Image (tube, helix red, strand yellow):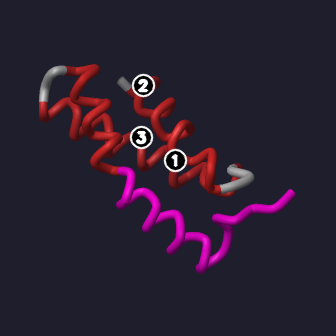
Amino acid sequence: MNAPFSGKHGETAFAQLCDELRPDLYRFAFWLARDRQVADDVVQEALLRAWRSRESLDGTESVKPWLLTIVRREH
């Protein structure tokens, strides 16, 4: 299994991807919560959960749906 987000280079790539997707994650969280503070908290917790599990991802194309699912579950 190829783990594109393992190691130092993988950490950097995953962090950049999260930064790029953060506005979309926030919009989705705000749509769910209808509260800015709750949306901020949900996104922060979701990204923390994702960071801990990043090595389980097989490829970069599945990152956005995976993160959106984490946001939904975190909410």
Residue underneath mark 3 = 46
Whether residue 37 is in magenta: the answer is no
Q: Secondary structure at mark 3?
A: helix
Q: Which residues are magenta?
A: 1-21
Nearest to N terminus: mark 3 or mark 2: 3
**Position in image of residue 22 (x %, y %):** 33, 50
Residue underneath mark 1 = 50
Whether residues under marks 1 and 2 lie with C-beta atoms below 8 angstroms apart, the answer is no
Rounded to the nearest angstrom, the CA distance separating label 3 from label 2 is 9 Å
Select label 1 or label 2 by which is in front.
Answer: 2
Residue underneath mark 2 = 72
The foreground one among 21 and 38 is 21
Left or right, 63 with respect to 25, comes to right
Q: Residues within 10 Å of mark 1 (few under 14, many from 20)?
A: many
Q: Secondary structure at mark 1?
A: helix
State the quadrant of the N terminus. Answer: bottom right
State the quadrant of the C terminus. Answer: top left
